Amino acid sequence: MSEVVHPIDQFLKARGSNRRRMSELSGIPTTTLASSVSRDASILNLRLNVLWALQVFYEPDRTMDDIMTELLVYEYQNEIGDGEMKSNNKNSGIYRKLKFDGTRLRDAYATNTAGVTRLNTMFRKLMQVRKFEKKDEFIALIIQCHSYVGMEVPAELAQMNDRKTFEEYSASFMMGLPGGKEKLEDEEGEEYEEY
């Protein structure tokens, strides 16, 4: 497996930039950026001025919430591992199924603007309970979300017995959730954009 690249570096690389260039543009010291990109720093603990700079200098047409969602997708991909979803290991099928279920749930919510708002709220709640490793609350939210749209809860989520399994399975599921606004716009005839 290759070395894990921090979500901020992945975000910048996708836009043809790097931390040094971001520091020059935003005036944020490189030491501040370096501390934001330390290995154990989660995106959920990102300093607001760094998030603001990413939005203002790289994606001014998107909201800070959109930037945060993209960074979280990168972080969840890092947690699952490089290529794990495509490999033939024993969990790759479960990872793909959970991500697909997250995508189906997103699509069920993304039928109107109110549904997209509910989806974004749900995503933030799931991020918070996941951050504090509250498995029971995570599963309760998943059940609530699925019942709201009349979908069956994936049985694989019942297999989250230890911390590692919880992190991997919840990350896989949550990777499918972002993009509700893009899905809604796609149904209105605009181009669909996936992270």
Image: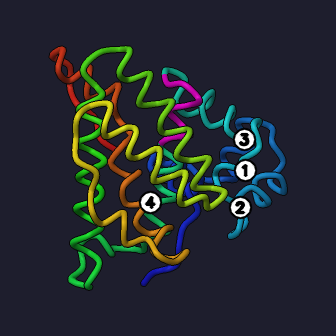
The residue under label 1 is which amino acid type? Answer: Asn
> Which of pointers 1 and 4 indicates the residue nearer the eye?
4
Q: Are marks 4 and 2 in contact (CB under 8 Å)?
A: no
Q: For mark 1, what is the residue?
A: 45
Gap in Å between the C-alphas at discs 3 and 4?
Answer: 23 Å
Residue under numbered circle 2: 41
| Sequence-first tag of 4 and 2 | 2
Q: Nearer the viewer, mark 2 or mark 3?
A: 2
Instruction: State the SS at label 4.
Output: helix
Pinpoint residue 48: horizontal percent, then vertical percent: 75, 37
Side of 87 where 56 appears, left or right: right
Tell me the kind of residue under disc 2.
Ala
Q: Residue at x 72, y 41 (%)?
A: 50
Circle nearer the N terminus (1, 4):
1
Q: Quadrant of residue 55?
A: top right
Asked if residue 163 lies left or right of residue 103, the reply is right
Q: Position of residue 96 (x, y in %)?
A: 24, 63
Residue 171 shows which numbered tag? 4
Observer-nearest residue: 180 or 144? Answer: 144
- Residue shown at 74% from the left, 55% from the top: 36
Query: If the image is split into quadrants, where does the C terminus sit?
Result: top left
- Three-letter amino acid code at the position of disc 4: Ala
Identified by mark 3, the residue type is Val
Measure the C-alpha gap from mark 4 to mark 2: 16 Å
Nearer to the camera, 60 or 158: 158
Q: Within 10 angstroms of label 3, few (less than 14), some, or many (20 or more) residues?
A: some
Image point 52% across, 45% down: which residue?
Answer: 126
Point out the frontmost of discs 3 and 1.
Answer: 1
* Residue drawn at (37%, 23%) of the image: 116
* Structural distance between the alpha carbons of marks 1 and 2: 7 Å
Q: Are marks 1 and 4 in contact (CB under 8 Å)?
A: no
Q: Mark 4 or 2, which is nearer the eye? A: 4
